[in-house]
C-alpha cells in the first residue's frame, strides 16, 4: 500500500538463429549478467509474445550464457535471425541498498519469498473507467520501469471491466474473473467501490494484493510463486501525470510514482523497515523524481529473473 549501491547496466550485442528450439549464446562483459538477462528477456517478449524463456546459465559474470527458447507447439512458426543490442549506460541509485523487504517477510510460520515465474510472461489489463487523461501511458511507463529492474516480461492484453475487490470473490477479490491470459489487473476506484479502497479512509492512495502458491526453484528448493495480483488506485486523488517530481502544493508525488510503488508490491516487495526517502517503496508518496532507490533496485532484482525459473508443486 501507499519510500546494488551504484548500479551498472549490461553491454552486449547478440545475434541468434532460432528454429523451434535453439540455444542463444551471449558473450557478456564482467558484472553484466543481470542487465543482459533483463534486457534480453524484455526484447524477446516484445518480438514473440508467449515464448517461454528458461535461462540455463549459472551466476557467473564472465563468459558465454546459453538460453534455450521454447516456442509453444500450438503457436509454432519459423523464427528468422534476430539481433538484440544492449546499450551500455551507468545509473546512480541513491539511498540505502538494504532498504527493501519482501511481502512474505515476517509471516508465521516462515514462508519463502513469493515472486512471479520470470520464465513466463505476465499478461496485464487496465480498467480505465475512473482514471484521468494519460493514465494508460503512465501505467505502461511504470510497467516498463519494473520490467527493466527485474527482467520480468509483461505483456499488455488490453482494457478490462474487472475491478479487483468488488463483490465477494476470494482473496484477492475478483481474480476468478480475470481472463485466462491475465495475471495482473490495474484499476481505479472511488472509495467504497472496491474493498481495497474503503470508505472513510481518505488517505489511501492505492492498494496492491497478490495470490501465491508453493513452487520449486531450479535447485528443487521450496519457493513462492505469485499467480494473480491486483493494483487499485483511489480515483478521487488527482495526481500529476508522469514521472517527474510533481507539484509543490496539493497531493505530493505523481501518478507515475504511485504506479511504480503499487506495481512493485504486486511483484513481491513490501515497504522497507529502514526509513529512506529515496526509495519508491517508502510508504508515503513525496515530492521527488520517480526513480528507483538503491534498496528498491536490490529488492526488485531478488524477485526478478536473477532468482531463476520456478515450477509449480
Image: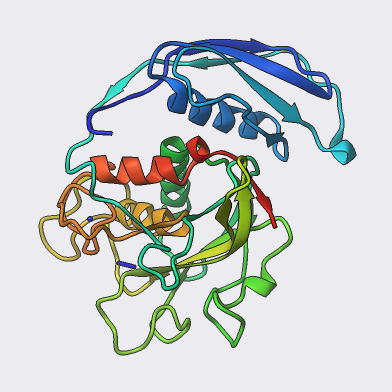
Q: Closer to the camera, 76 or 34?
A: 34
Left or right: residue 52 versus residue 302 is right
Q: Where in the figure is residue 126, as x and y percent of width and height?
A: 55, 60
Residue in the picture at 26% in, 57% down: 272
Q: Where in the figure is residue 138, as x and y percent of width and height?
A: 41, 49
Identify the image's colour scheme: rainbow, by chain, secondary structure or one colour: rainbow
- Quadrant where the C terminus is found in the figure: bottom right
Left or right: residue 259 versus residue 22 is left
Q: Is residue 65 visible?
A: yes
Q: Is residue 73 above or below residue 89?
A: below
Q: Is residue 127 visible?
A: no
Q: Closer to the camera, 289 or 190?
A: 289
Q: Closer to the camera, 255 or 304?
A: 304
Left or right: residue 14 versus residue 288 is right
Residue in the picture at 58% in, 86% down: 167
Q: Where in the figure is residue 51, as x and y percent of width and height?
A: 72, 36
Residue in the picture at 63% in, 13% down: 25
- Residue 1: quarter of image: bottom left
- Residue 94: quarter of image: top left
Left or right: residue 77 versus residue 156 is right
Q: Where in the figure is residue 312, as x and y percent of width and height?
A: 69, 55
Residue in the picture at 27% in, 81% down: 202
How many marks are shown on the rendered structure? Answer: 0
Q: Is residue 139 above or below residue 185?
A: above
Amino acid at each position: 500500500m501507499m519510500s546494488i549501491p551504484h548500479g551498472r547496466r549490461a553491454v552486449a550485442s547478440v545475434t541468434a538463429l532460432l528454429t523451434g528450439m535453439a540455444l542463444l549464446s551471449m558473450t557478456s562483459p564482467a558484472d553484466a549478467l543481470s542487465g543482459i538477462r533483463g534486457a534480453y528477456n524484455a526484447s524477446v517478449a516484445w518480438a514473440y509474445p508467449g515464448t517461454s524463456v528458461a535461462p540455463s546459465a549459472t551466476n557467473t559474470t564472465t563468459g558465454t550464457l546459453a538460453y534455450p527458447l521454447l516456442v509453444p507447439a500450438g503457436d509454432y512458426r519459423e523464427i528468422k535471425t534476430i539481433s538484440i543490442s544492449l546499450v551500455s549506460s551507468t545509473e546512480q541509485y541513491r539511498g540505502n541498498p538494504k532498504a527493501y523487504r519482501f511481502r512474505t517477510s515476517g509471516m508465521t510460520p516462515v514462508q519463502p519469498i513469493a515472486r512471479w515465474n520470470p520464465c513466463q510472461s505476465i499478461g496485464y489489463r487496465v480498467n480505465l473507467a475512473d482514471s484521468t487523461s494519460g493514465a494508460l501511458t503512465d501505467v505502461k511507463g511504470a510497467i516498463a520501469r519494473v520490467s527493466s529492474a527485474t527482467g520480468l516480461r509483461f505483456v499488455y492484453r488490453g482494457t478490462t471491466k474487472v475491478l479487483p475487490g468488488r463483490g465477494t470473490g476470494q482473496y484477492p477479490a475478483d481474480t476468478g474473473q480475470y481472463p485466462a491470459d491475465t495475471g495482473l489487473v490495474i484499476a481505479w476506484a472511488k472509495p467504497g467501490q472496491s474493498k481495497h479502497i474503503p470508505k472513510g479512509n481518505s488517505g489511501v492512495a492505492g492498494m496492491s494484493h497478490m495470490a501465491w502458491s508453493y513452487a520449486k526453484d531450479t535447485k528443487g528448493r521450496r519457493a513462492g510463486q505469485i499467480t494473480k495480483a491486483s493494483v487499485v488506485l483511489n480515483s478521487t486523488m488527482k495526481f500529476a501525470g508522469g514521472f517527474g517530481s510533481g507539484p509543490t502544493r496539493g497531493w505530493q508525488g505523481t501518478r507515475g510514482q504511485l504506479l511504480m510503488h503499487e506495481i512493485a508490491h504486486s511483484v513481491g516487495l513490501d515497504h522497507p523497515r529502514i526509513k529512506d526517502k529515496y526509495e519508491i517503496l517508502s510508504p508515503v508518496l513525496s515530492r521527488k523524481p520517480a526513480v528507483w532507490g538503491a534498496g528498491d533496485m536490490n529488492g526488485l532484482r531478488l524477485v526478478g529473473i536473477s532468482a531463476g525459473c520456478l515450477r509449480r508443486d
